[in-house]
Amino acid sequence: MQRLKQLELWLQGLPPGPSFSLSPASADASFRRYFRAEYADRTLIVMDAPPEHEDCRPFVHVAELFGAAGVNVPKVLAQDIGQGFLLLTDLGSTTYLSALDDSNHADTLYRAANAALVKIQLASKSGVLPIYDEALLTRELRLFPDWYIAKHLEMSLTDAQQGVLQQTFDLLNRNILAQGQVFVHRDYHSRNLMVCEDNPGILDFQDAVTGAITYDLVSLLRDAYIHWEEERVLDWAVRYWELARKARLPVPSDFGEFYRDFEWMGAQRQIKVLGIFARLYHRDGKDGYLKDMPLVMSYLRKTCERYIALKPMLRLLDELENRQAQTGLTF
């Protein structure tokens, strides 16, 4: 309550003026909260990021970078870094996720998302954003044994199982670090893309890094919150790859190689996300993500089924879920 009063007091001293009403706009998996400030002639968004938990400066920095790249991100109208408050333009309340109920609209939205992603990647410069290096990749992967296996499943791994996990992590990291390196939004999916006149409106980019070129495409097409048939995913992936090649972005000239990189990047992200969702539940008491775990696990299992090098990981998942091993095509 005290925090909300501080925020209101800060807003009263800013244009468009002291007369407004506040309502919750959204919350995310961090400590950040968003409010919609309604004025007589417009609405604006206020970010509340408690400075003891969050730092607003990366948001401001990436908003400038992505805005300069020509994509639709909120403009920072006012900031108080010390208190953790930002005043932003409002990109509306219609997420891609809510609009994608109408799958006929999906092609238009995903093509726009692909085009915006290419713009962000074309703006990439070295030394501007943190590097998505092996240490960070490994820290993320460790969330799976620490939170999903130990806390969520309440299981302990044998030495042999730990070896399989480490071997899988090493394989994925080598592939990911060898991919072309570009700006990476890091949460480029249907909850953070907004339906606007200039599609998409892009939110929640404060954790952006320089990393593998397939990362954001995986976030978009192997989305934890909405599932598409493989044929549609392939079509959208091909369309992105064609755009990226035409733009001379660092993607392989062979689509098969690109799609392998896409899937292996996806496996890293899915392993991480299972750990994050488990941590959100067990540490933070947020149970809303539990329903999304089966989809994320299904993505991971399908990728591990397709590649011989990832078959040991599939067998480990079978052991953790007490499943009989499946047979199928591998590459």
Image (cartoon, grey):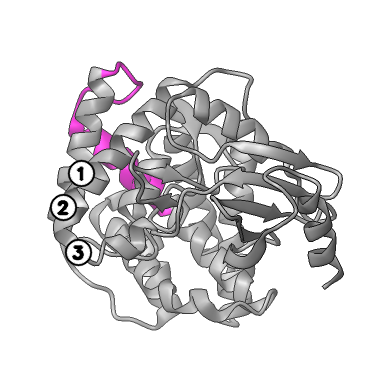
> Quadrant location of residue 111?
top left
Label 2 – label 1 distance at C-alpha: 6 Å
Q: Is residue 67 left or right of residue 244?
A: right
Q: Amino acid at mark 3?
A: Asp
Residue 130 appears in the rendering: no
Against 248, residue 257 (above or below) is: below
Q: Is residue 320 left or right of residue 8?
A: left
Label 3 – label 2 distance at C-alpha: 14 Å
The crowd level at tag 3 (other Cα within 10 Å; few <14, some 14-19, many 20+) is few
Tag shown at residue 232:
2
Element type at marker 3? loop
Q: Earlier in the sequence, mark 3 or mark 2?
A: 3
Q: Percent from the top left, x then y, of residue 42? A: 54, 50
Q: Nearer the viewer, residue 64 or 222?
A: 64
Against 137, residue 156 (above or below) is: below
Residue 287 appears in the rendering: yes
Q: Nearer the viewer, mark 3 or mark 2?
A: 3
In the picture of the structure, the residue carrying the numbered disc 1 is: 236
The crowd level at tag 1 (other Cα within 10 Å; few <14, some 14-19, many 20+) is some
**Marks 2 and 1 in Cβ contact (< 8 Å):** yes
Against 66, residue 275 (above or below) is: below
**Marks 3 and 1 in Cβ contact (< 8 Å):** no
**Marks 3 and 2 in Cβ contact (< 8 Å):** no
Q: Amino acid at mark 2?
A: Arg
Magenta includes 251?
A: yes
Q: Percent from the top left, x then y, of residue 227? A: 27, 64
- Residue under the image location 62 percent in, 28 percent down: 129
**Span highlighted in magenta in the image:** 247-267
Q: Percent from the top left, x then y, of residue 36? A: 59, 59
In the picture of the structure, the residue carrying the numbered disc 3 is: 102
Element type at marker 2? helix
